Amino acid sequence: MLMGLVILYVVFAIPVALACGSVVFAAESARRTHVKSRLLAWGAALAFAGLFVMALVAWSTREDKHYDDFGSALQTLAALIGGSLFLTGLGPATPWLLNILRRRAARLSPVIRLAARDVDRNSRRTAAPIAITMVLTAFAVASLIIAVATTAQSRAGYQPQARPGTLVVNVWAEDASIARAVIQQELPGAPVAQKDVLDHQGYFSLDVKDVDLPDVESVHPAGSIGDQAFLRYLTGNPATPYDDGTAVVVTPDDIQVDTVTLSYSLSTDKELKDLRVKSIPAIAVRSADPHVNEVFIPPKVVRDLGLRLEPDKLIVDPSAHRTTKAEQDRIDRRLGDGESTYVERGFQESAGWMGVVAAAIGVALGSALVAGGRAGAGGRSRRVLLRVSNGSVLTLRMFAASRSGLSMFCGTALGAAAGCVIGLLVAWPSTTSIGWEVPQRVSFETPWWAIAGLVAGLPVLAGIIAALPGPRVRGFTRW
């Protein structure tokens, strides 16, 4: 636990510290105008180094193969450090962009022209908060792209644990009867199926000859052992014939099966010196769910071999009753901590990243508003506008809106561009597989419309907030 917290701290602390360097770099570049070209060169070198690191990690993780936990963590950390270096290198570009914006606004309306001049002339005050806006916008955009990529990969690799709508309760053998009574009380009339497993004694496996089924030969558990209700849950058909001496191969494929070969041992010896073999009749039945690919063994067959069984799972067939979230919560409360419940609802997207992105955007917006306020600290442009507009309050509000909107635009323009580069490159190590069964990497739709909405909408929102009337103080407003 402690080691995990240390690793988590390192993974996030190093990139955050490097990204904060972008703010310092921007402030230093704005303060020392005579060495701005040198700082721009240093920034370009850092940005190129970060881009190279991210590209190298993306190239090294391009293959669809197994990546061990430690290697995957190192690759992700390297990609994040590369992204942070890239952001750090963009720090000096903040005052440079302000200067470009002031020159390009020369032919625009006086309000925008004076606002751009204020933001650039006071770059010692505005560069740092605009750099904060840039960093947080880049973080939000990169997080958005990575979340979309990982969600698409997780959806493609999702394997349902049961049929859709199924309630599965993992039980202890000694508490199975209590759990069954709870389920029957909360879901009256719903049939409860039982899946069994071997106890800790003996060995059991099965083989279906000439049939290509996954996991049909295993040590524990072997096949799917359960009662008649469990067989009908597997097939999805309440009319499925049941015989306590016949195995049933439940598969979505059309196959013919006559016998199933059982290998078993009553000994706990790992070398299985007394391994025995027995064949039993079998039939094949089509499953209603394409993910159900099982070999059903009646409990009597296993007990007749001298092996002992114990309850493992209690299942409520969704064909008879689809369990709701409220019903699952009630069963959870009554069962306590001894048993765990699960309802198969398909792939569920995680929405936790949305809160993080929203928080980053909120802080970025606040920082741009601070930059807009600092840009007008001198008040010279404000006095010019007062003379030109005959003291119009609307003109002053448009002026304040222009300062904050331009500050937000500079931060979001740089940040969105950096976030797109970082997100598209870091998405590669973020979608690697640490499992031995490696799913194929899937493509994903980059959320360009959402990114465009941020770039276009945030400056407008910053301008609207800055233009709102201020509080009255002793009978006068701040205008």
Image (spheres, rainbow, N blue to C red):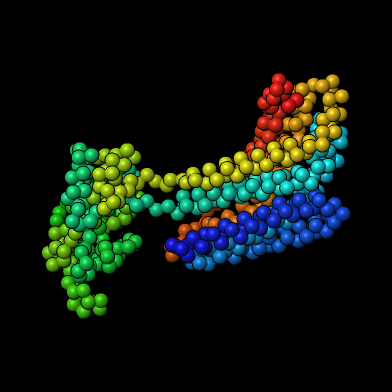
Instruction: Pick the quarter of the image with the C terminus.
Output: top right
* Residue lying at 64% horizontally and 57% vertically, measured from the top left: 17
Relative image position of residue 207 (x, y in whole percent): 26, 66
Lateral position of residue 326 relative to residue 152, left or right: left
Q: Percent from the top left, x then y, of residue 28?
A: 78, 53
Q: Nearer the viewer, residue 274 or 190?
A: 190
Give the residue furthest to the front.
474
- Figure check: 186 above or below 249: above
Relative to 277, is 345 above or below?
Answer: above
Which residue is painted at 84% across and 32% down in the image?
Answer: 381
Which quadrant does the N terminus fall into? bottom left
| x and y percentages locating residue 239 in the rendered image | 20, 44
**Residue 234 shows up from this direction:** no
* Residue appearing at x 85%, y 52% in the figure: 33
The quadrant holding residue 186 is: top left
**446 on left or right of 384:** left
The image quarter containing residue 202 is bottom left
Image spot of residue 347 (x, y percent): 42, 47
Q: Nearer the viewer, residue 59 or 120?
A: 120
Residue 126 in view (yes/no): yes
Q: Is residue 76 left or right of residue 183?
A: right
Q: Nearer the viewer, residue 63 or 138?
A: 138
